[in-house]
Image (tube, grey):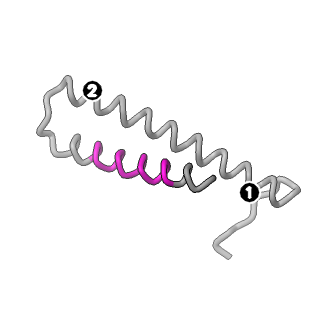
């Protein structure tokens, strides 16, 4: 991921956390809840896409496509 992607990823995660909190608080009406849920789903899909792209780049950098346990 580029620096811009990282910022977008981090911003998306923050926005997603805000949406989850708002939905958990339950202080919004049904229509706004559905809109927030839809926005959250869109953010999740975008984050998953960015993570998949980053994983593919790591695999390419490793050369053989094998995954490596980065915790080691």
10 is within the stretch colored magenta: yes
Estimate the x, y position of residue 66 in percent, counting from the top left. 81, 57
Q: Is residue 70 left or right of residue 10?
A: right
Of the numbered discs 1 and 2, the one sitting upstream in the chain is 2
Q: CA distance from mark 1 to mark 2?
A: 36 Å
Front residue (pair 5, 66): 5
Farthest residue, direction front: 4
Which residue is denoted by mark 1 in the rendering? 58
Residue depicted at x 49% and y 53% = 7
Residue 23 image point, x, y percent: 23, 40
Q: Residue at x 62, y 53 (%)?
A: 2
Magenta stretch prevailing secondary structure: helix
Mark 2 burial class by Cα count in 10 Å: few <14, some 14-19, many 20+:
few
Q: Is residue 12 left or right of residue 36?
A: right
* Magenta-highlighted residues: 7-20
- Find out whether residue 45 is within the magenta segment: no
Tags 1 and 2 touching, CB below 8 Å? no
Where is residue 33? Give x, y as percent.
23, 30
Say which quarter of the image contains residue 37. Answer: top left
Pointer 2: what residue?
34
Which type of secondary structure does the marked residue at label 2 adopt? helix
Marks 1, 2: nearer the viewer: 1
On the rendered structure, is 28 left or right of 21?
A: left
The residue that appears at 82% across and 60% down in the rendered structure is 62
Q: Quadrant of the C terminus?
A: bottom right
**As rendered, which of 5 and 27 lies closer to the eye?**
5
Name the residue at the top extreme: 31
Q: Residues within 10 Å of mark 1 (few under 14, many from 20)?
A: some
Q: Is residue 62 found left or right of 47 in the rendered image?
A: right
């Amino acid at each position: 991921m580029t620096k811009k992607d990282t910022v977008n990823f981090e911003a998306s995660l923050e926005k997603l956390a805000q949406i989850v909190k708002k939905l958990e608080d339950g202080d919004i009406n049904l229509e706004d809840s559905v809109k927030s849920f839809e926005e959250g789903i869109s953010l999740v899909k975008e984050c998953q896409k960015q993570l998949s792209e980053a994983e593919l780049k790591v695999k390419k950098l490793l050369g053989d496509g094998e995954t490596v346990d980065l915790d080691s």
